[in-house]
Amino acid sequence: MDKRYPAAGPVTLTTLLADNASTKSLKAGRIGSDLVSFDYVDFPLVFDGFKPMVREGRFDFGELAIVTYLQARALGKPLVLLPAVIGARFQHHCICYDAHRGVIAPLDLQGRRVAVRSYTQTTGVWVRGVLQEEHGVDPARVTWVCFEDSHLQEFRDPANVVRVDEGKTPLGMLLAGEVDAALLGSDMPDDPRLQPVIPDPKTAGLYWHRRTGVIPMNHMAVVHADLATQRPDVVRDIYRLLLESRDRDTPEAGGMQMRQFGLEALRPSLEAAIRFAFAQGVISHPIDVDDLFDDTTRLLGTQAHLPA
């Protein structure tokens, strides 16, 4: 869907943005702009807005899971990435098993059933990539038990994915012994029965980061491609607002800024996300990192993006 924006002056953008830790100041109006304002469309769960974003072009600006964006870009959807991370975390702890049923190590997953919300869920792609590259697990030898389809209607699950009946959940199936492990992510309850498949996941994640430079992003900022083409001044101001909000709300901690901004800072993480997604059949072909951006967004965070 093509969009037309005013050639100059203030604009109001239909926006998908959750109450994220790093965007509190922006959403609360503690920082603002004379050039751009935001018409927020709220969903109980922000990822429920991803389908209308990629299928209908509903939003001018918002957050989007990085794997969903990779799929959208590979399929030619009119969305452009900003080098601005909305949310990130190390994912090593997100796959667990029920210790009452015995210990499961990474290689034990081969030939077993693992529950994950969707095969294309960003957390699942990160975890499968780590399991494959760090622990030698072949994701094709695991049966992935899924509950939802992809945000992109063109995608078809691979043969080793099975769907379950409505009403079931990854946690419920794990505790009932219907699957051997589950990816729970932010849904991970404080339950002593649940133990990580990857031992000492915090240490493992930090060690992996030190070797690779990767900080796994979940959601990043995107804009409609027509906005980037027609109003690069607006896109630059969005980036400024996101960066200011991040620095106010989620400053660097322990010598690390999890929510990275700028293409070069993000390059190792984006390269890993692309490599994992392609290896797992989530995207049909590799994408060069620079091709995730356009001439406006690629320069954000550099001196070159500042107006003359």
Image (cartoon, helix red, strand yellow):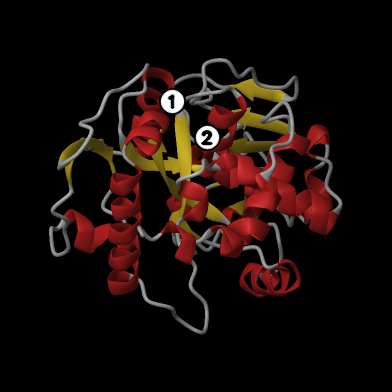
Viewport quadrant of the N terminus: top left
The image's mark for residue 54 is 1
Q: State whether residue 164 is above or below residue 125.
A: above
In terms of image quadrants, where is residue 162? top right
* Residue at 51% over, 19% down: 165
* Residue at 52% over, 77% down: 256
The residue that label 2 is drawn on is: 68
Q: Earlier in the sequence, mark 2 or mark 1?
A: 1
Instruction: Give the residue type that dot 1 points to.
Output: Val
Q: Nearer the viewer, residue 76 or 235?
A: 235
Q: Secondary structure at mark 2?
A: helix
Q: Residue furthest front?
A: 308
The image's mark for residue 110 is none
In terms of image quadrants, where is residue 142? top right
For this view, does 34 lie left or right of residue 276?
left
Q: Residue furthest right?
A: 136
Q: Position of residue 194 (x, y in %)?
A: 57, 57
| Cα gap from disc 2 to disc 1, whole angstroms | 8 Å
Q: Secondary structure at mark 1?
A: helix
Answer whether residue 4 is visible to the viewer in this image: yes
For this view, does 268 lie left or right of residue 224?
right
Q: Are marks 2 and 1 in contact (CB under 8 Å)?
A: yes
Q: Residues within 10 Å of mark 2 (few under 14, many from 20)?
A: many
Q: State whether residue 254 is above or below residue 57.
A: below
Instruction: Give the residue type that dot 2 points to.
Output: Thr
Q: Position of residue 101 (x, y in %)?
A: 68, 50
Viewport quadrant of the C terminus: bottom left
Total label count?
2
Q: Residues within 10 Å of mark 1 (few under 14, many from 20)?
A: many
Q: Nearer the viewer, residue 73 or 128?
A: 73
Q: Position of residue 13 (x, y in %)?
A: 22, 37
Q: Position of residue 243 (x, y in %)?
A: 35, 64
